[in-house]
Image: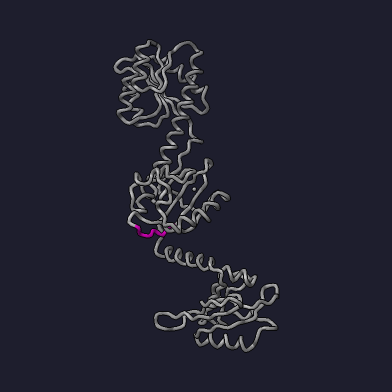
Amino acid sequence: MDVSPLHGIAPFSTGQRAMRILLVDDDEAMVDLSATFLEREPDDAETETYTDPESALDELTDGEYDCVVSDYDMPGMDGLELLTAARERSIEIPFVLFTGKGSEEIASRAISAGVDEYLQKGGPEEYPVLANKVSNLVEKYWAETHMRRGFLAIESAEEGIGIIDDDGVYQYLNEAYAALYNRDRSELIGEHWDILYPADEARRFHDEILPQLESEGSWRGLSTGITKDGEAVPERLVLTQMDDGGHVCIVQELTEVDALRAEAELKGRVLDAVEVAIVVIDPSRPDNPIVYLNAAFETLTGYDAESVTGRSYRFLCGPETDPETVAEVRRAGDAGESISTEIRNYDAHGDPFVSRLDIRPVRDDNGALDCSIRFHRPADDAGSS
């Protein structure tokens, strides 16, 4: 799913918190007995007991509880009326009706009112059952609360967050994700992700990015999407594979600086895709060092970028390199002129190779020499740069 934390949302954890249960019964001896059993059976349970439903309702409103266990038949307010009043105050914790008055009518009313569990009082054998039901309800409530908070975090995040299934179809995305592409999310749910990318970028996803995601489990990098109106959206992506074969996508629009970097990376990918060996020389620095080389140059010479960047181009010369050709190349480079010639150089293993060398100057808007680009082709390739 390197991504900054979602803004302003603290993770939800119940690992170090006791289960808090509110018990309501007008019979003081019965409510105390229930509290004793419930504190004994579940791990780390805490109870509060009330004999007055009105006072219990005020406590529920102000306190933090995980479950209510209430009698049904109580003066002033019965258990189902307490449930209705709690829900009207947006108290959504589990509610167990634990009553000595059992009847089909009460059970039916309890189900209609939305109680989470209905249990008749009996002997001591009923309390382990009650404790088990309360524990299961609280664990379910905690899990659902955790899930709700997670989705709240996703919905409120500044980053665009989407879930894509194994077929490449959007199953979920937040508003920030859709807004990045000037769309409503209802337009994207059920659509394939390639609706947001130009054809050449979609091909790159299929050919490069998704295979890497499948093999490594994640991918992060820069891409370019499109809005509904066809405008380019430079973006930073983090993709994380899910167990079912789909993936989570987190997307951020790039800043202007990031966009320039993305453009440079795109040009670098284009140059690496070219089969002609390319080197860029900086004539403004001492000894005219190499400042860029593409993948084809590495293949041709056996030298990688780390070993030659910043070095003079002359390291390719060897015992059979023609001095007059070297001097001609140097003069053209110093003068900022174009030249095309054949030259013998030596690779990283000391083996000679002959190539057609084309030098082309690149000037800035004022006509000053900015850099010099050198193209190496096989000597029998008659094409020009």
State the residue in front, 178 or 272. 272
State the residue in front, 257 or 338. 338
Q: At 66% across and 74% down in the image, what residue appears? A: 347
Locate residue 297 relative to residue 87 in the image: left or right: right
Residue 71 falls in image quadrant? top left
Q: Is residue 292 above or below residue 112?
A: below
Q: List x then y, in percent, for residue 146.
A: 44, 37
Magenta portion: prevailing SS class: strand
Task: Look at the image and tell me whether residue 27 can be seen.
Answer: yes
State the residue in front, 70 or 183. 183
Locate residue 196 relative to residue 123 in the image: left or right: left
Q: List x then y, in percent, for residue 54.
A: 31, 22
Q: List x then y, in percent, for residue 24.
A: 38, 20
Residue 254 falls in image quadrant? bottom left
Q: At 52% across and 22% down in the image, what residue appears? A: 41
Magenta residues span: 230-235
Q: Is residue 349 above or below residue 56?
A: below
What coloring was used for the rendering? Answer: one colour
Q: Is residue 86 magenta?
A: no
